Image (spheres, rainbow, N blue to C red):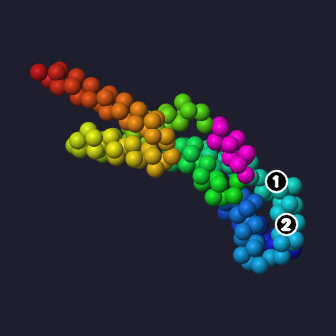
Amino acid sequence: MEQARAICLRLLTGTPRTRKQLADALRKREIPDDAAEEVLSRFEEVGLINDSAFADAWVESRHHGRGLARRALAQELRTKGVDSTLIDAAVGQLDSEQEEATARELVARKLRSTRGLDRDKRLRRLAGMLARKGYPEGMALRVVRQALEEEGEDTEFLGDEGV
């Protein structure tokens, strides 16, 4: 039991972890199930393990830091062993407007690096980047097309002004 407690405390020192991640670590170190269960339950009682708070923080961090969409965030949380009701609550904090605004920011940042390529290639590249981050195809294509149209209008406007 003491060994299980020490393992959990060490793992929680660097990074918050889910109950499943800690349970897997204890199993890997061959801690008996009853001792592991007792320590994990106690850690939950005192708030050292809180999968709901973990999921909320994960969504906040990964959406703002990496621009991941709800679908990608939900998948990451599933692999970390977070319960599906907690996942739904955490990703539910992101509404579609916020998700679309983040998609626009990502496209705006990447747009410049695709200049010089033909329109279809740019569209595929930018929409592919959004798809890898979990954005729905319809939203990705709409956001990229709008960005390309706005950019096209800007360059046409600048060209006319120069004449």
**Residue type, label 2:** Glu
Badge 2 element: helix
Stretch of the chain drawn in magenta: 83-93
Q: Is residue 28 above or below residue 100?
A: below
Q: Position of residue 138 (x, y in %)?
A: 45, 36
Q: Residue at x 87, y 61 (%)?
A: 42
The quarter in which the C terminus is drawn is top left
Query: Residue 59, can we see it?
Result: yes
Task: Please report the residue visible at 39 percent of the width from the left and 39 percent of the height from the top.
Answer: 107
The answer to which quarter of the image holds residue 40 is bottom right
Q: Earlier in the sequence, mark 2 or mark 1?
A: 2
**Residue located beneath label 1 in the image:** 47
Residue 65 appearing in the image: no
Q: Main secondary structure of the magenta part?
A: helix
Q: Which mark is residue 37?
A: 2
Relative side of 1 to 8, left or right = right
Q: Which mark is residue 9?
A: none
Label 2 neighbour load within 10 Å: few <14, some 14-19, many 20+: some
Label 1 CA crowd tier, 10 Å (few <14, some 14–19, many 20+): few
**Image location of residue 127, percent across then percent down:** 39, 42
Q: Is residue 61 magenta?
A: no
Identified by mark 1, the residue type is Gly
Q: Is residue 87 magenta?
A: yes
Q: Quadrant of the N terminus?
A: bottom right
| Residue for point 85% across, 66% down | 37
